[in-house]
Amino acid sequence: MEKVVLASASPRRRELLKRVISSFVCMAPVVDETPKAGLGPEEQVVCLASRKGEWAAERQKNSWIIAADTLVVLGDKLLGKPKDPEDAARMLSALNGRWHEVMTGLWVSDGQRVRTFCEITRVHMAFDEWEMQGYIATGEPLDKAGGYGIQQQGGLLVDRIDGDYYNVVGLPLYRLRHILKDMGMKVFPESGFETCP
């Protein structure tokens, strides 16, 4: 198989990609993650993924590149990572009892062609003040967009989702697998399972 590069520093994305591709290398892109003015959330998340993918493609010529970026969207607001526990409480309180969307932009290149896509999953959360404060006390919300990680303790605050669970974790596996397959890469089950170098 040709060299595959995951343009992400996220350990969650790395673990998820192992389910689809047997061997790949990880690069942490150094890009400006400031939102671009005038773009809607779906365009924004694809733009951010594209910056990461293009950064990696410049450094790894003739390689497969996979890049992703995930945003949490509540109404017309983009929720990033909380600055502190108080900010996490504000975010989680805003999400409580309401549907929000988790959007992941994908940027995939085989060294010649590029495909982009935005996957959207709707998430509904329901919890009381004691549960929220207990969750914030774990410290987990501080490095998660929207202030929670569904794959960890934050999953206890989620009562239902509509869409791809793995998208909420940070990498929509079903969509990614089909993009790679359509572009000619052999993916699971042919690839087997190995660890990321």
Image: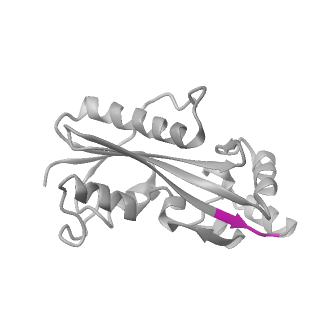
Magenta-drawn stretch, dominant element (helix, strand or loop): strand
Name of the residue lying farthest toward the left: 1
Where is residue 5 drawn, in percent x and y?
Answer: 27, 46
Magenta stretch, residue numbers: 123-127
Residue toward you, 124 or 58: 124
Left/right placement of residue 128 relative to residue 182 reads right
- Inspect the magenta stretch and tell me whether residue 40 lies in it: no
Residue toward you, 175 or 133: 175
Where is residue 78 drawn, in percent x and y?
Answer: 66, 42
Q: Residue at x 23, y 35 (%)?
A: 60
Q: Residue at x 26, y 55 (%)?
A: 180
Query: Taking 100 as reference, is 26 above or below it?
Result: above
- Inspect the magenta stretch and tell me whether residue 126 lies in it: yes
Left/right placement of residue 110 relative to residue 95 reads left
Name of the residue lying farthest toward the right: 129
Q: Quadrant of the N terminus?
A: bottom left
Where is residue 147 drawn, in percent x and y?
Answer: 68, 53
Q: Quadrant of the C terminus?
A: bottom left
Left/right placement of residue 5 relative to residue 33 reads left
Query: Taking 84 as reference, is 131 above or below it?
Result: below
Its colouring scheme is one colour
Q: Residue at x 67, y 51 (%)?
A: 146
Residue 186 appears in which quarter of the rendering? bottom left
- Image label count: 0
Query: Taking 32 as reference, is 147 above or below it?
Result: below
Q: Residue at x 68, y 73 (%)?
A: 156
Q: In this view of the protein, can residue 29 be seen by the observer?
A: no
Where is residue 18 drawn, in percent x and y?
Answer: 32, 63
Q: In this view of the protein, can residue 54 be seen by the observer?
A: yes
